[in-house]
Image: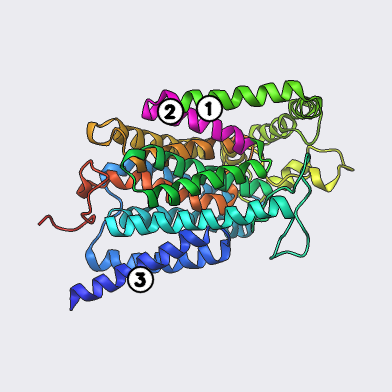
């Protein structure tokens, strides 16, 4: 009887978390309701089975995550709007998706279905995005997406902006590309179509979003992927595409002129919409509040103080367009260092697993690292971590890279033994 109750709770947890992953591809509301239910069920399961997610093997990840959250809490309390800041800080609960994902990804049957749910969601809503690109349809909104510069429309799917769509699907596309290319010869035809199709459509959708940061991230991600797999074909293919793009830009004056103007504006310290201008002013905020920052939600107020009084509303930023600078503005330099520590811990843990003999080409580890690289590159020109839609998906990707570190799994990502269970 006890076993049946535990199995039921595990299945309910799995179902709600699968809904979270699937829902994240098109609806933040559905995804976070499902994640909230998953968290409640996970706490019940963990108490009932005495499951401890905070193991020594992942201590640095949890230490930096804890320090980051605590410092963000202190910074919010010390800011000008403590109540508002603490309410905004509720986004940090998305970290809970990682221990839940680690718990579920440790079981073969759950792991395959979770990946399938993610791939189906990516495939379906990228196809909707591609339909949007060619026709301008936007079934959930009365206003069509913006026209593209050359032709078609700028894809934003069911998300609030093309930037969110590009960052989300660029990261997801790299994740599935790493998963498929890391084990191409071992996959059956159905898996190749499902996961390979998700990767390809997501990459095409990212291009259709005109999100330059995510597109650059994809190129960097494929270079990293070629090095992880020691595959020259991937590296040469990526280089060939880059060379083709450069040639096309040189040949056609329109794109060349627009690209030149774009970089000139973005690198100009005087252009109020450029990244260098935004970063310079954001760093001034950090210099004035180096230890605790200004607290969550207060960036806009401090940023406005550095601008001319009659500046247009579209230039009144709410974040620093760089994750690390953004965290430094709201939580000070210590908060930024703790945030960087989280990233370093994830990359070190995943890379360590990949380097072991039995996991040298482990597809999930390669997928997690490749997807994380694309997210990280996009976050250098956008505050992607502050975008809940993309961030909640990153938590699942990190779980796929970290679950192999759980001690009951040994060092194999292919075991079906559940963490916390006794060896037979």
Q: Is residue 374 on the magenta stretch?
A: no
Q: CA distance from mark 3 to mark 1?
A: 42 Å
Q: Is residue 320 above or below residue 31?
A: above
Q: Position of residue 357 (x, y in %)?
A: 23, 31
Residue 365 vertical position relative to residue 124 in the rendered view, above or below = above
Does residue 170 show up?
Answer: yes
Mark 1 crowd level (few <14, some 14–19, many ≥20, 10 Å Cα): some
Q: Which residues are magenta?
A: 213-233
Which residue is pictured at 81% across the width and 38% down the height? 307
Q: Residue 396: x and y, percent?
A: 43, 51
Q: What residue did someone put label 2 on?
A: 226
Left or right of residue 176: residue 107? left
Mark 3 to mark 2: distance in Å? 38 Å
Image coordinates of residue 235 in percent, x first then y, are 47, 25
Left or right: 3 in relation to 193: left
User: What residue is shown at x 49% (from left), y 23% (from top)?
Assistant: 236
Image quarter for residue 381? top right
Looking at the image, can residue 385 be seen? no
Is tag 1's residue or tag 2's residue first in the polypeptide sequence? 2
> Which element type, helix, strand or loop, lies under badge 1?
helix
Label 3, secondary structure: give it: helix
Residue 163, how many percent across, how many down?
66, 46
Q: Which residue is mark 1?
A: 238
Residue 1, quarter of the rendered image: bottom left
Residue occupying the point 80% across, 42% down: 315
Front in this rendered view, residue 238 or 66: 238
Q: Do residues under tags 1 and 2 come within 8 Å of each other at their CB atoms?
A: yes
Q: Residue at x 58, y 39 (%)?
A: 323
Q: Is residue 48 above or below residue 112?
A: below
Q: Nearer the viewer, residue 208 or 276?
A: 208
- Number of disc labels: 3
């Amino acid at each position: 009887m006890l076993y049946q109750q535990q199995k039921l709770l595990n299945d309910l947890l799995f179902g709600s978390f699968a809904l979270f992953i699937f829902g994240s591809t098109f609806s933040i509301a559905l995804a976070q309701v499902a994640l909230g239910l998953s968290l409640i069920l996970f706490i019940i399961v963990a108490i009932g089975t005495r499951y401890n997610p905070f193991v020594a093997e992942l201590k640095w990840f949890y230490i930096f995550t804890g320090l980051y959250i605590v410092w963000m809490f202190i910074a919010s309390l010390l800011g000008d709007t403590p109540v508002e800041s603490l309410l905004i800080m509720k986004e940090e609960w998305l970290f809970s998706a990682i221990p839940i994902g680690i718990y579920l990804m440790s079981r073969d049957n759950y792991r395959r279905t979770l990946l399938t749910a993610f791939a189906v969601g990516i495939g379906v809503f990228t196809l909707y995005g591609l339909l949007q690109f060619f026709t301008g349809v936007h079934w959930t909104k009365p206003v069509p997406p913006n026209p593209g510069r050359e032709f078609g429309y700028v894809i934003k799917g069911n998300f609030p902006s093309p930037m969110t769509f590009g960052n989300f699907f660029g990261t997801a596309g790299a994740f599935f590309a790493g998963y498929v290319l890391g084990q191409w010869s071992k996959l059956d035809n159905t898996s190749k179509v499902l996961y390979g199709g998700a990767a390809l459509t997501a990459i095409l959708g990212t291009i259709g979003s005109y999100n330059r940061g995510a597109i650059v991230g994809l190129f960097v991600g494929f270079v990293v992927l070629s090095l992880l797999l020691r595959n020259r074909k991937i590296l040469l293919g990526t280089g060939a595409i880059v060379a083709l793009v450069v040639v096309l830009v040189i040949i056609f004056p329109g794109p060349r002129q627009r690209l030149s103007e774009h970089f000139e504006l973005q690198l100009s310290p005087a252009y109020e919409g450029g990244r260098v201008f935004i970063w310079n002013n954001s760093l001034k905020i950090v210099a004035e509040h180096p230890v605790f920052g200004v607290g969550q939600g207060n960036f806009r107020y401090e940023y406005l103080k550095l601008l001319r009084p009659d500046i247009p509303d579209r230039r009144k930023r709410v974040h620093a367009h760089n994750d690390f600078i953004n965290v430094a503005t709201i939580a000070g330099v210590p908060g930024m260092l703790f945030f960087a520590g989280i990233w370093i811990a994830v990359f070190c843990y995943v890379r360590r697993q990949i380097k072991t003999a039995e996991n040298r080409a482990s597809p999930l580890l390669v997928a997690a690292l490749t997807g994380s690289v694309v997210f990280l590159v996009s976050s250098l020109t956008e505050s992607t971590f502050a975008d809940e839609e993309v961030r909640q998906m990153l938590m699942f990707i990190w779980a796929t890279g970290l679950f192999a570190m759980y001690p009951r799994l040994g060092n194999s990502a292919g075991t079906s033994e559940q963490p916390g269970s006794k060896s037979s």
